[in-house]
């Protein structure tokens, strides 16, 4: 999704803007641009280009800009208007240049108003309408603060803005609503970014700009205003991530690096929340006692982690769980169970649908708990309580280590819920925790050692146009995630099906050569899934099996490519099996020569509806 950067200060501005834009590339974009105040401070030069940052750099080099003193930059992921030079940001008006993330919903009304005032438009973006509205207000008020507080009243939708007024060329102004923006300062000047990874090379301290506040970034620091007349404070916090964590570290792709980090991020997540032999999680005790129902709400892979959470919580804590897609939950009219808890899972903590669903749950008076990876992100800040996964920065668009960290934290939460609601003895709880902390990381490491073997099996999938993943129970939940992972990075169409459901329609799609991947990790359900696999085999399907060593030993297994995963017990198996499925998707996409980390049309963090 779009990215914003900005800097003003006594260091060379242009390299900072470009390095920061590169750090945001992982979010997904289709054009990029900058506005730079050159050293003489007289003119603001705006350059933009459809395509990658390399193309923008070529334009910058042709324009022979100096390194500048103040500037803003943007990577755009098209929403209103196709990817093009004219739709790329920054957008300019007579008195200003600005970059914007989000969607201005009342752009059509603003355009009508601005046409009456004599404005013309050169792009089809909502952002240009916002730029010209701010220009109109600035011409009337001659003051950035009055202008921006007035603009806040007139803009409907979501926004994060970085703005330079031409007659104040050493300041960057910023404000936001429903779209993230952070401000940082060091001895050289001030930084603006939509994502903390952009500023990691310069400083480890940042403030998340509160909604409704206007920030003025200057060479000598940042000032924050709660109204045109009132200065206010914003709290600065330290980020524990380092710039190195956001590098590939010798791996061919971030996705492969991040899958390989799973043992360590799971250990870090578990030890962060374990209090000796039991889950700590003291801050959530008031939210979780006496629960009769739990909702888990999220999008994409985070929602699939929620399904594994449902499996854990229902089996370990015996509390019924509904897993809801956030974009549906936010508009659902259905009544909610009174006295329930809603858990919101998000890697980024900025997913627009998840945030809106959280706000709906709060409006309805339901207690809310967030499971989030990015510190101080919007979901983390707005939920009643937050539990952080310790996955570190996840750069690849395809979420892998964040999913495993979410699942492991959900396992711990299930144990905590079990103790709190008296469905689990302390002894049993200690056994689960011991197994998680002693065995999970090593079980995943043993799957990682099979990477080459999985790569060979992936070669057989390369020419598939359609593919089916099937499983029962938690294996079906894993199938959903495996199918999403394969689709998003390899562009092979795939579907996940509960094994027993195939014969109610979908089996008509199975013909000679159709690739079917069966997931068999639950010994009690394996014989049933095998029945379904025999049904597809007899219709000519080609089979790949992901199954535990024990199931392989104890059942008569049909002819298939086989990837074995460790037996473990039911709390360990889903997470180590997910790792094998992630590797299968990764190797398939990598062998197809695709841009694994930045799949087409996708953004890392989906901050618009
Ligand atoms: O940041 P979030 O966890 O809220 O993101 C949710 C989904 O957008 C995300 O998991 C998406 O499905 C991934 N691209 C899947 O790999």
Image (tube, grey):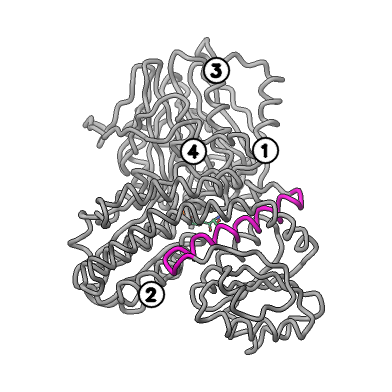
Rendering quarter of residue 453: bottom right
Question: What segment is highlighted magenta in the picture?
Answer: 568-593
Label drawn at residue 322:
2
Label located before the other in sequence (2 or 3): 3
- Residue receiving disc 4: 131
Q: Are marks 4 and 1 in contact (CB under 8 Å)?
A: no
Label drawn at residue 175:
none
Query: Marks 4 and 1: which is nearer the front?
Result: 1
- Residue receiving disc 3: 43
CA separation in Å, label 3 and label 1: 21 Å
What kind of secondary structure does the magenta stretch mostly adopt? helix
Q: Give the percent coordinates (x, y) of residue 398.
A: 57, 52
CA separation in Å, label 2 and label 3: 57 Å
Query: Marks 3 and 1: which is nearer the front?
Result: 1
Left or right of 152 in this view: 488: right
Query: Marks 2 and 1: which is nearer the front?
Result: 2
């Amino acid at each position: 999704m779009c990215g914003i950067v900005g800097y003003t200060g006594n260091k060379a501005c242009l390299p900072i803007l470009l390095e920061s834009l590169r750090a945001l590339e992982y979010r997904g974009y289709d054009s990029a641009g900058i506005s730079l105040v050159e050293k003489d401070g007289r003119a603001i030069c705006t350059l933009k280009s459809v395509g990658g940052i390399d193309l923008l750099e070529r334009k910058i080099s042709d324009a022979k800009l100096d390194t500048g003193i103040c500037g803003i930059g943007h990577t755009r992921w098209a929403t209103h208007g196709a990817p093009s030079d004219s739709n790329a940001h920054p957008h300019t008006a007579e008195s200003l240049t600005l970059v914007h993330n989000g969607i201005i919903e009342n752009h059509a009304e603003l355009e009508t108003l601005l046409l009456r005032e004599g404005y013309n438009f050169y792009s089809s973006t909502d952002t240009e309408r916002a730029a010209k509205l701010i220009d109109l207000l600035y011409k009337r008020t001659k003051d950035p603060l009055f202008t921006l507080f007035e603009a806040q009243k007139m803009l409907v939708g979501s926004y994060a803005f970085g703005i330079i007024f031409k007659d104040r060329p050493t300041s960057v102004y910023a404000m936001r609503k429903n779209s993230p923006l952070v401000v940082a300062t060091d001895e050289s000047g001030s930084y603006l970014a939509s994502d903390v990874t952009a500023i990691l090379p310069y400083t480890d301290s940042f403030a998340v700009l509160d909604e409704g506040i206007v920030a003025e970034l200057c060479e000598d620091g940042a000032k924050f205003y709660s109204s045109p007349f009132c200065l206010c404070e914003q709290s600065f916090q330290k980020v524990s991530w380092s710039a190195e964590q956001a590098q590939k570290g010798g791996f061919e792709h971030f996705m492969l690096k991040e899958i390989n980090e799973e043992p360590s991020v799971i250990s870090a997540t578990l030890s962060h929340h374990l209090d000796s032999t039991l889950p700590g999680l003291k801050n959530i005790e008031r939210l979780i006692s006496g629960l009769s129902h739990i909702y888990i709400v999220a999008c994409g892979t985070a929602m699939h982690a929620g399904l594994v959470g449902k499996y854990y919580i229902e089996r370990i804590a015996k509390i019924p769980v509904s897993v809801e897609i956030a974009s549906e939950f936010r508009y659902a009219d259905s009544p909610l169970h009174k006295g329930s808890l809603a858990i919101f899972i998000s890697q980024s903590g900025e997913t627009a649908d998840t945030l809106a669903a959280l706000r709906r749950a709060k409006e309805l008076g339901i207690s809310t708990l967030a499971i989030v990876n990015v510190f101080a992100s919007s979901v983390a800040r707005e939920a009643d309580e937050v539990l952080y996964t310790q996955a570190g920065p996840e750069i690849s668009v395809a979420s892998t280590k964040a999913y495993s960290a979410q699942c492991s934290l959900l396992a711990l939460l299930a144990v905590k819920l079990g103790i709190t609601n008296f469905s689990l003895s302390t002894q049993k709880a200690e056994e689960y925790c011991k197994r998680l902390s002693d065995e999970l990381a090593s079980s995943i490491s043993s799957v990682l050692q099979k990477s080459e073997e999985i790569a060979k099996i992936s070669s057989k999938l390369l020419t598939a146009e359609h593919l089916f993943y099937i499983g029962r129970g938690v294996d079906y939940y894993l199938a959903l995630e495996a199918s999403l992972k394969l689709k998003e990075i390899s562009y092979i169409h795939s579907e996940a099906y509960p094994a027993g459901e195939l014969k109610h329609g979908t089996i008509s799609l199975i013909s000679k050569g159709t690739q079917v991947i069966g997931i068999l990790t639950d010994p009690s359900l394996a014989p049933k899934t095998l029945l379904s696999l025999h049904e597809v085999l007899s219709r000519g399907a080609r089979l790949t099996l992901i199954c535990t060593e024990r199931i392989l030993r104890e059942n008569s297994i049909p002819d298939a490519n086989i990837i074995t995963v460790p037996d473990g017990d039911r709390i360990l198996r889903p997470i180590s099996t997910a790792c094998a499925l992630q590797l299968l998707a990764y190797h398939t996409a990598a062998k197809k020569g695709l841009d694994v980390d930045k799949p087409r049309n996708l953004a890392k963090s989906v901050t618009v509806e």
